[in-house]
Image (tube, helix red, strand yellow):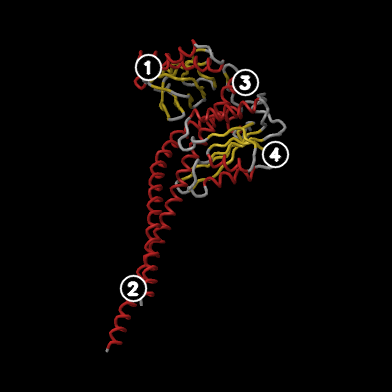
Amino acid sequence: MEVSNEVAGRGMRDIKRRIKSVNSTKQITKAMELVSSAKLRRTRERVEKTRPYFNTIKDTVQDIFSSTRGIKHPFVSEREIKKTCYIVITADRGLCGGYNANAIKTALHHMQDKKAVSLITVGQKARDYFRKRNYDFDGEFVHISENPTYSDAKEISSLVLRLYEKEMIDEVYLVYTQFVSTISQKPEIIRLLPLAGEKKEKEQDKGFEYVSYEPSPEEVLDYLIPKYIESTVFGALVESSASEQGARRVAMENATDNAEEMIGHLTLSYNRARQAAITQEIAEIVGGAEALK
Amino acid sequence: MASTFQLEIVTPDRKFYEDQVDMVIVRSTEGDLGIMKNHMSLVSPLAIGVIKIKKNGEYREAACAGGFIQVKQDKTTIITDSAEWPEEIDVERAKKAAERAEERLKTKTAEIDLIRAQAALERALNRLRVAKKG
């Protein structure tokens, strides 16, 4: 009698303990969900504010490419590719679902020969991943991905341009995560250098429009290309930070839901165990009384 | 009214201005440029200076920290690192920045720092000038 009660009691105690631990995990994930919702709201506003700038520069550069011909510029002309540089933007922290893994996978998928690749990483996750696998590094930036500033983007792009000018790298790709909506983020890869003039088939509707460049097309491009790189990097950083918060929010929301479901199951088995214990006790008392007769 | 055109000024953190205007005067790297309706297509980098916007016969000024201007048939776009109306300028901060930059120019350092300090000084002085006028 003593023994069986003990077992039921322990079962109940164990379940109770588990409920408690799941509950405290739930509280943490819930708190993280709320924090990332708040951050998401802020970063989303930033994305919306920076998009016009980002798009305007992109359009302008494309315009110039489509309206000028035969411009010779080191950042435009292709050369033999010996070293490809990847700028990979991830978060500093995990617990955000597949966000980091997806960005890294996109980059890996695109890389061909490990020896012909060098990396500039943003965020601890990408750094740790590629460090561990002994990739070549050109630079690493941490603690900027949550709240990127324009000067961060400037630093990254000046590093890239410097390396490119010295011909230490011959091609630059940027891997980031496009913020589509709160529940959807898409990893993207774009080529930064050399700039490819996307051939837009616009020419037939307007004919060739003469645009004057003061003082000269080359000098305008000299100014414009670094700006273009900077703003693209900045745009990518901002998009990625919004995506990170979005991904984390969704991941934490799921974790909270799962914890709730688990607590439900555990409570059910707790009640069952409790009832079994009571039933058993009554049976024992009845049995005892019966024996005394 | 017929001689207005669309002007848009964007900075990395906001859309600074978007409206129909009569004329805009900017300081390009080659000198001052006045743009009115039907100006030919043009792209030019901008120096640190003032953007003067004429709308309904009235002028408004803004400080501009370099960038570039793109004039197209239907629309003119100015892309700049930062733009501020006179009332938005933090005079104290600009003064301090000017002092700091002057300090740095006196102590000779690497060339890149000198260029940076010079640019910072120019930006600060430009802000102060605009703020005083506004």
Q: Amino acid at mark 4?
A: Lys
Q: Amino acid at mark 3?
A: Glu
List the residue tagged with mark 2: A275
Q: Amino acid at mark 1?
A: Tyr
List the residue tagged with mark 3: A218
| CA–CA distance in space, label 2 to label 4 | 66 Å
Chain for numbered disc 2: A
List the residue tagged with mark 1: B59
Q: Assign a secondary structure to mark 4.
A: helix
**Of marks 2 and 3, which one's residue comes earlier in the chain?**
3
Q: Residue at x 56, y 34 (%)?
A: A140
Q: Which mark is residue A115?
A: 4
Q: Quadrant of the C terminus of chain A?
A: bottom left
Q: Are marks 4 and 3 on the same chain?
A: yes
Q: Are marks 2 and 1 on the same chain?
A: no
| CA–CA distance in space, label 1 to label 4 | 59 Å
Q: Nearer the viewer, residue A179 or A26?
A: A26
Please determine whether, in this image, residue A56 is positioned above or below residue B26: below
Q: Nearer the viewer, residue A188 or A166?
A: A166
Visible in this render: residue B12? Answer: yes
Q: Are marks 1 and 4 on the same chain?
A: no
**Which of the 4 quarters of the picture holds residue A170?**
top right
**Of marks 4 and 3, which one's residue comes earlier in the chain?**
4
Q: Assign a secondary structure to mark 2.
A: helix
Visible in this render: residue B56? Answer: no
Q: Amino acid at mark 2?
A: Gln
- The 10 Å Cα crowd at callout 2, few under 14, some 14 to 19, many 20 or more, is few
Q: Nearer the viewer, residue A165 or B22?
A: A165
Q: Assign a secondary structure to mark 1.
A: strand
Please determine whether, in this image, residue A198 is positioned above or below residue B43: below
| CA–CA distance in space, label 2 to label 3 | 84 Å
